[in-house]
Amino acid sequence: MSATILQITSTEEKTFQNQDALPPLPCPDLSKTLQKYLDSVRPHVSDEEYQQTTEIVQEFASNAGARLHRLLEEKAKNENNWLEKWWEDLAYLETRSPCAPMINTGGEGPYYRHYWPAKVGTQIERCAMCLYYTLEFWQFLRRETLRSQTNRNGQSLCMNQYHTIFTTCRIPGTKKDHLLYYFKTESEGETPRHILVLCHGRMFTMGITDDTDELITAPEMQKQLQIIYDKCIKEAVGPSVGILTAHDRTSWAKYYKELLAIHPGNFQTLELIQKSVMTVSLDEDCPQDTSELFQKAIAGDPTNRWFDKSINLISFKNGLFGSNLDHSPSDGMTTVHMTYYVDCRVKESKGKWTGNMTVRDLEPPKEITLHLNESIYQGIEDARKIYLNTAKTVKCNILWYDKYGRTFLRSFNLHPDTHVQLALQYVYYRLNGKPAPTYETATIRVFWHGRTETIRSCSMEAVKWCQAMLDPKVSKAEKLNLMLAAAQKHNTLRSEAQNLEGCDRHLLALYVLARDNGEDIPAIFTDPAFIKSGGGGNFYLSTSFLGYTTAQGGTLPMVKDGYGIFYHIEEGLIYVFASSFKDSDSTDCEKFNSLLTEVFNEMKDLLEIHTKVAHL
């Protein structure tokens, strides 16, 4: 058996066996939340503004905040996760703006780094292998053999997002969307066993298992994909109905209802789309480098997309791969785990199929169509224009920094993620002369159905270090000491956020309670300092650390004049994805990454002042 399969699977424990033993999401302490909020505000306001905000927070703590917090405590007594539904609704499902390209996540297949460099003529063969390995991961979940995860302290992590990564679809609503989950483990019952293949604006369903519930082989998948591709090349381009999923959500809901009303057959067709395990897009584009690959994955040609699906594998004509995912059912690390598995399998096989070469006579893929009218055709064109108008403003840039990585940083007892976060703060400060309200993702999967909390990375310690780095009068030794102090602060912030001891999710809950109870929105949420510090989705640096594997993804900035920064760290490499908007007068992700290279070098010079640094 494959060494990779042996490493990530288990015959002794089941994937979801620890779910019921996970602790419920705790209710944070109000005074600690408010102090942490004030600490995060301080770098972004004047002394006078800070005093005003302090008074607003004190008043909130004594009155509305205390009352709302008591309501939250009562809710937390009766629910395993008081945040889950609120977060899903406010962060995703109530959003009325288009999901693509602004909200969906994009990724690359790292396989080009070894056995699958760009090469025209390899698309279908490679796609079949990539699809097969991806569906192996699906099968591990179906059979509950994927090893249940723990953190480095040995605590079990919630695996619920692995239950929603496949066979999930977002359904548009007039005021709020909802998610449909179709995946079931073998112990739970039957589950859909087909994928959706999109090619030249047309749609096909393709079975993925045989009569014994085993996956059909990669050569068999290749034959099926080739049938689809050959048919589409020879015949007319389809209507690209999936582009409707790029419309604003309320408009898409209107067209969705209209599709259901046009013809009774549309219900069954939409169900086939929604129930598909995943989608595969056979694209004609040929990305020339990694920056362009991300550009096309996040904001590329929408002809072959159904943006509401939880997984969309994009197979480019030159044999490269990308992905586009609806963010609402799961966070990025589940996809990182899956992508890294596929990467390891491609490496193991040296890019060539080594299994059974027999190709059985299988039922061919079936083309599916929707009955359309003039209104729907117009909706498709309108959605295409809206999408392309946004897509043309998107800029992505990739930095491969290979002068050091995890090994070098660990030799100084430094947390690699902290090092990068400080570098991002410094780059932004140098470019703008002020600190950036910063969002870094922290996982809270130690709790039942836990997803994320915000690490507000911009601390006063980080600001003091940035200022010192720009002051020629400050010695290198002092700059190093300030950097280490800022690093210690960030380590603390990370640790606290992973235990839901940040401030953003707690404040969100109090805001929702006030809103849903018909109360006046408390002044803490209308105070200018709330926005200035990043509240309400106004973080100018939206960042996420994707771990130590080869898998990489990213999203667009939260705000027009912001950046989306996602990175992973290998033993001798720091890989950074940066995004910005071309119509912003103050941001340029290419310039940001160029300066980031200089900053990494500068920080390396500081560290090498001493050969040993106290453990952080």
Image (cartoon, grey):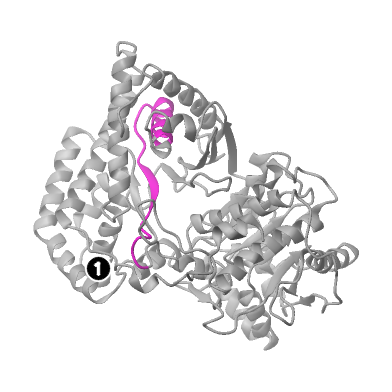
Q: Is residue 306 above or below residue 557?
A: below
Looking at the image, which is closer to me, 105 or 380? Answer: 105
User: What residue is shown at x 65% (from left), y 46% (from top)?
Assistant: 110
Q: Residue furthest right?
A: 234
Determine crowd level at label 1: few under 14, some 14-19, many 20+ residues with C-alpha closer than 10 A. Answer: some
Q: Residue furthest bottom?
A: 264
Looking at the image, which is closer to me, 367 or 244? Answer: 367
Residue 386 makes an appearance in the image = no
User: What residue is shown at x 53% (from left), y 82% (from top)?
Assistant: 187
User: What residue is shown at x 79% (from left), y 51% (from top)?
Assistant: 317
Could you say whether the residue bearing mark 1 is in a helix, strand or loop?
helix
Indicate yes or no whether the magenta region holds residue 404: no
Residue 445 makes an appearance in the image = yes
Residue 614 in the image, given as x and y percentages of width and height: 30, 28
Residue bounds of the magenta highlight: 419-448
Q: Is residue 395 left or right of residue 423?
A: right
Indicate yes or no whether the magenta region holds residue 427: yes
Write down the quadrant of residue 582 in the picture.
Answer: top right
Figure quadrant of the C terminus: top left
Looking at the image, which is closer to me, 569 or 176? Answer: 569
Q: Is residue 366 left or right of residue 3?
A: right
Q: Is residue 104 above or below residue 310?
A: above
Q: Is residue 542 above or below residue 200?
A: above
Write down the quadrant of residue 44 in the picture.
Answer: top left
User: What residue is shown at x 58% (from left), y 64% (from top)?
Assistant: 247
Q: Is residue 138 above or below residue 473?
A: below
Instruction: Look at mark 1 in the image and give the residue it sits on.
Output: 513
Figure quadrant of the N terminus: bottom right
Write down the quadrant of residue 135 in the picture.
Answer: bottom right
Q: Amino acid at mark 1?
A: Leu
Q: Is residue 472 left or right of residue 120?
A: left
Residue 131 in the image, given as x and y percentages of width and height: 70, 62
